[in-house]
Image (tube, rainbow, N blue to C red):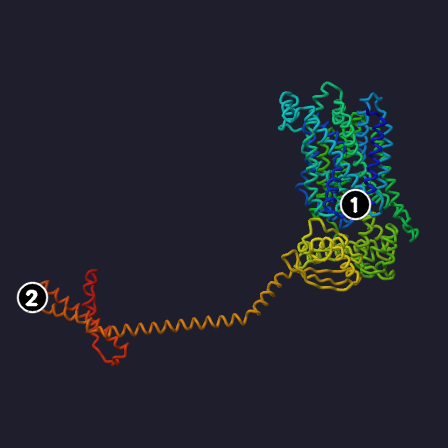
Amino acid sequence: MLNAWSLILIALAYMGLLFAIAWVGDKKRIAHNHRNVQALIYSLSLGVYCTSWTFYGAVGSAATTGWGFLPIYIGPVLVMLFGTDLIRRIATTSRDQRITSIADYIAYRYGRSHAIAVLVTVAAVIGSVPYIALQLKGITNGFDVITRSTGAPPGWSADLSLYLALALALFAMLFGTRNMDASEHHRGLMWAIAFESMVKLLAFLAIGLFAIFTVFNGLGDIAQVIRDNESYRRLFSPWQMPEGFGIQLVLAMAAILCLPRQFHVAVVEFRSYGELRVARWLFSGYLLVFTLLVVPIALAGLTQFAGQSVNPDTYVLALPIAFDREALTVLAFLGGFSAATGMVIVATVALAIMVSNDIVMPLILRSGLVRSSDKTDLSQTLLRVRRVSILVVTLMAYAYYQAIEAGVPLASIGLLSFSAAAQFAPAMLIGLYWTGASRLGALAGLSTGVTAWFVLLLLPSFADSGVALAWLPDLDFNQGAIVSLVLNATTIIVVSLLSAEREAPTEAASADLSASGLLTLGELQSTIGRFLGMDVTREALATHIGAADLEPAALATPATVQFGERLLAGSIGSASARTVLTTALHHRGLGPEAVMELLDRTSQAVQFNRELLESTLDNMSQGVAVVDRNLQLVGWNRRYLELMDYPEGFVHLGQPVEELIRYNAERGLLGEGDPGSEVPKRLDHLRSGHPYRYERDWLGEKVVEIQGNPMPGGGYVTTYSDITHFKDIEKELQLVNETLEQRVLQRTRELQEALGEVEEARQSAEAANQSKTRFLAAASHDLLQPMNAARLFVSILRQQQGDSGDEQAQLVKRVDRSLTAAEELLSALLDISKLDSGMYEPEPESIPVTDLFEKLRRRFKALAANRDLQLRV
């Protein structure tokens, strides 16, 4: 039977399991380059969004407001499905600029403004403390519900919450502050968070199925219960949404990116777009599972505990307890425990990074500690600051937990924190899509929005606890949230329009820029190394400039200074990194305005060159891959991925080239040799530093020319050219050369045969023509004899008619003339045939034209008369 000590042992064992998972994830680096596993871990780590509010409070909200829980789930789903490009843009920029937090990102967008970073950090801490306290409240409520069912006195778990808070702070210190570089991925921590996401999903799924098939007899029974109860019909009517549904949907959409912990897992831990595309569907499905099960659990609690004083927020635990399902109770407890602890761990890590980078670090810079000694190592100091910050934030949340009322719904505390985080959305989104947004506008908008949130939303929450604040405006939560966001966005736009940022440097600054020198490499290494460690800094700078050793006396180029700023930003934030380098350059004689102008101009130039290079490489017909001297992939273009046909998300920055070679060998792209021997051979060749060039059949359908050239500082630039088309042409030319003589002989023979056939046809035609001519010449007498006989008969008729002018006599004359014309025509044809046969020689002579025309007139006169025409010749 469950009791207080058994629950404590279960919680301790579970925490020990989390420690083990995080340690293995950090030390063993299991599947750290396996794209599918990493995409799964990234998707599940986003599940830190599901806290004790969504695990316990969503059911309580459904039991009291009906569909009031929906915005909290639907908002993130909409952003993941339709805002993937937005997340990709923010995450890619943050990865390239080594952004460490949401405060760092917003400050970077507005010129690395330290004031904006501080304001965002303070607002994030104030807004997150109630949310962390909510998690402690959720855990202690779970302890109370279970132990109360065993007869233990209520409230005993209040003391336990302090020890729990300290244990979570210890976990966050161990696995969230292992490295100084805050932009580096926390693999062990993300493994633990992903595991907790799986636990709470399985727990909620088990409770939901228990409610559907044990408390009820399936979905049909649930529908019948709703139809039979008037209050349930009103509560879950699809046509009656609760008040504030729209504004709460907006808050939830903003929270998926603006909550410090969500920004950390979604942006800082971002590795590749392939992982984001998987998370787009996997995380959306994760939230939809919770969404579909909330109503059955809430309805089961309403029917099972009708008339009892059971807090709706505890239905998830109360249901298995009521049915005496001990194993299910433990699973539900661990699900709620996971939901709360995951949020506390990630939130405290994210807030500690913001506090140390944007508040403590500037204080250290102003204190004179940085200038006291060039050899002072601040890296361990900053790590200790982060660990102390985690402890302080956790204790603040514990104090808030002790101050709030025990009966305050979890949803109200969660919405309060959501509305605080939403104040970052206007500055983030307006700055992302509108280049005219200014630093002063963002600062004014954030100040206005945070102040409105504090007055309209946070202070009334204390008034509900009995604090007298009669002067507060009479606005409910939804109205206050709308007013604060509208004031925030409007102020940013108006102030940005009224006060444009100065774009051109002053004359004094320009003069300073042209007259002063930059840092030496030794000074730059010393400046950055005090925060990151000298060895790490030396190796990073050497890799950047492509040299095995640094020359301390050599001047650092503007690009190297900008690289150093980005390197430093990954540890202390972009605003503090700008301050450190500004101080260092100022000591070299540059004025403050010149320093800022130099860094801004260099940053813009490097960004422009980077974008130009990326655009150029992506539009090349050749694939390009670059490996550094450590044989790690540091650059490639889109054509390279297309030619190599790697799986989506397989290639990533810093990937050992050995993995790529081994993958190609396993696909048979390196020949028929043993992959185990082919990989070392190629690695040895790369280490030798010799250029190479060869052609290879690729994927059974292409021929690729691969050419590698060593770089001066080590590493290789390799180009991959698809020469399949040229190879096809080469084969065709070879085939043409081999068969050219044969085809010439064949064409000559065919031409001769054709000419012979033409000659035979000509001779046959001439022979036929001669035969025709001879026939006509020989048959001329026989052809004319019938005509002569006919004319003789006509002459006899004319004689018999005499000179009578009747119609019959005229007809006989016409027949006689026609026969005469036909005889003349035949005579002409016979004469032509005789001329063709050579029997006659033509003798030209003059003939009277009038006789010819008269014959024509007589021949066509009748035809013209039939058509009522008058023929004139």
Quarter where residue 824 is shown: bottom left
Residue 21: x %, y % from top left: 81, 40
Q: What is the crowding at mark 1: few (fewer than 14 residues within 10 Å), some, or many (at least 20)?
A: some
Of 774 and 126, the residue lying toward us? 774
What is the three-letter code of the residue carrying label 1? Ile
Q: Is 145 rendered above or below residue 668?
A: above
Residue labelled with disc 2:
804
Q: Is 614 rendered above or below residue 830?
A: above
Q: Is residue 803 left or right of residue 520?
A: left
Q: What is the crowding at mark 2: few (fewer than 14 residues within 10 Å), some, or many (at least 20)?
A: few
The residue sitting at 79% across, 36% down in the picture is 342
Looking at the rendering, in which quadrant would you find the N terminus? top right
Q: Which mark is residue 372?
A: none
Q: Which mark is residue 30?
A: 1
Q: How many marks?
A: 2
| Mark 2 vs mark 1, CA separation in Å | 134 Å
Q: Is residue 675 left or right of residue 758?
A: right
SS for dot 2: loop
Looking at the rendering, in which quadrant would you find the C terminus? bottom left
SS for dot 1: loop
Residue 391: x %, y % from top left: 86, 37
Residue 546: x %, y % from top left: 80, 60
Nearest to viewer (mark 2 / mark 1): 1
Of 674 and 558, the residue lying toward us? 674
Say whether disc 2 or disc 1 marks the residue closer to the N-terminus.
Answer: 1
Quarter where residue 852 is shown: bottom left
